[in-house]
Image (spheres, rainbow, N blue to C red):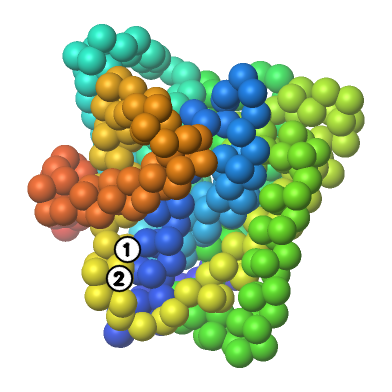
Amino acid sequence: MAQTVITGQQTRLPKQRIFLFDNIKFLAILLVVVGHGINFMTEFEEPFWFANYLYLTIYSFHMPVFLFISGLFLKPMNNETPFPKGKVISYVLIGIVLRVMMSVLRLFLGMSPAFSVLEIYDSLTWYMWAMAVFITLMWVFREHNTKIFLLLSFIIGCMAGYDSNLGDMFALMRIFVFMPVFTLGYMLTPESVAKFLSNRILRIVSVFVVIGFVILFFSNEDIYTYLRPMFTGRNGFGVLDEGYSFGCLYRILCYAISVVFGTAVMALVPNRNLGIISKTGAKTLQIYFWHKFLFVIFEAFFLFEFIVGKTNLEIATAIYIILSVGVTAVCALPFFSFPTKQLLAFGSRLSKDNGSNKKIR
């Protein structure tokens, strides 16, 4: 199996850029921003069902798609591949810098910093830590059968919710839950995925799949109640109350929905250069890093409440969603490439230095 991976290394990276994945990443990061933008609306004392259903729809597939693409573009590793410490250290540092800067901003605005060293409870930095862990695990098991690792990670992901010791500590619950998605992406190649998604019949079917899931999510309160905490990947099965014993079945159901819905959405994304959209899709990390800062500022100045006071809840929500699109565009500006660009470059230098040292020895 290892030889298959090594052979695929020559064809893994396309000779010409496949804009499909830039466009998919744009959609995924846009949904990340919108999801974080409306998250607080799902916590109203009186349920605001439009925001709740939209949140459920977004979270049912957007992070699995994001992590699938992340795994898809991780280069195959074999027994001669040195530990990718540059990438790992870069992601860890980005996560640490993000948390520190966010805490400083909240303090400056008179808000609680909510800082913790070990518990990665927030909706941002867990991704950075998870990426560092995923890359490390792919390297550790680089000589083993990837299909077996996928199966094991799937089983662990299905059962992790029964372990009350897992949770926000080092984002372990999210890591176990999303590990199969990242692994699946790692096993495939961009070319094979692009070819699969270009199937005309798949695209036609995908239209009905997307419409069907949207109708389903926007019409059933019970689905929101039970599946919302599962789709975040953060919660154990204790949140299911009487459904605790069937927690693994709920997790399998969530995996199935994410795969089917996510595949359908990706199949409908055009595979061509969409100009600024494609360019923005290549800047997802900096957008991911900065967008929450703007939302914290909005929160500190009660922007949503102000808009509601001038309009109504529904119009204010629509304006906030449009505002989320604007936040995505602003965070894609070259100015906001700091500090992610510098931290990634630092990691790249570490990798090169490591290679130079090996040659000297």
Residue 278 appears in the rendering: yes
Q: Is residue 277 left or right of residue 251?
A: left
Q: In which image quadrant can residue 97 be found?
A: top left
* Amino acid found under the numbered disc labelled 2: Ser
Q: Residue at x 39, y 45 (%)?
A: 319
Q: Nearer the viewer, residue 17 or 212?
A: 212
Q: Nearer the viewer, residue 92 or 56?
A: 56
Q: Is residue 3 left or right of residue 164?
A: left
Q: Residue at x 52, y 58 (%)?
A: 65
Q: Nearer the viewer, residue 216 or 122?
A: 216
Q: Residue at x 37, y 61 (%)?
A: 26
Q: Are dots 2 and 1 in contact, CB under 8 Å? A: yes
Q: Is residue 219 above or below residue 48?
A: below
Q: Residue at x 30, y 20 (%)?
A: 300
Q: Is residue 146 above or below residue 106?
A: below
- Name the residue furthest bottom: 200
Query: Is label 1 in a helix, a strand or a loop?
Result: helix
* Amino acid found under the numbered disc labelled 1: Gly
Query: Residue 10, image x and y in percent?
Result: 38, 80
Mark 1 burial class by Cα count in 10 Å: few <14, some 14-19, many 20+:
many
Q: Which mark is residue 55?
A: none
Residue 233 appears in the rendering: no
Q: Which residue is mark 2?
A: 278
Q: In which image quadrant can residue 21 be found?
A: bottom left
Mark 2 and mark 1: Cα distance apart in space: 5 Å
Query: Is label 2 in a helix, a strand or a loop?
Result: helix
Q: Which residue is mark 1?
A: 281
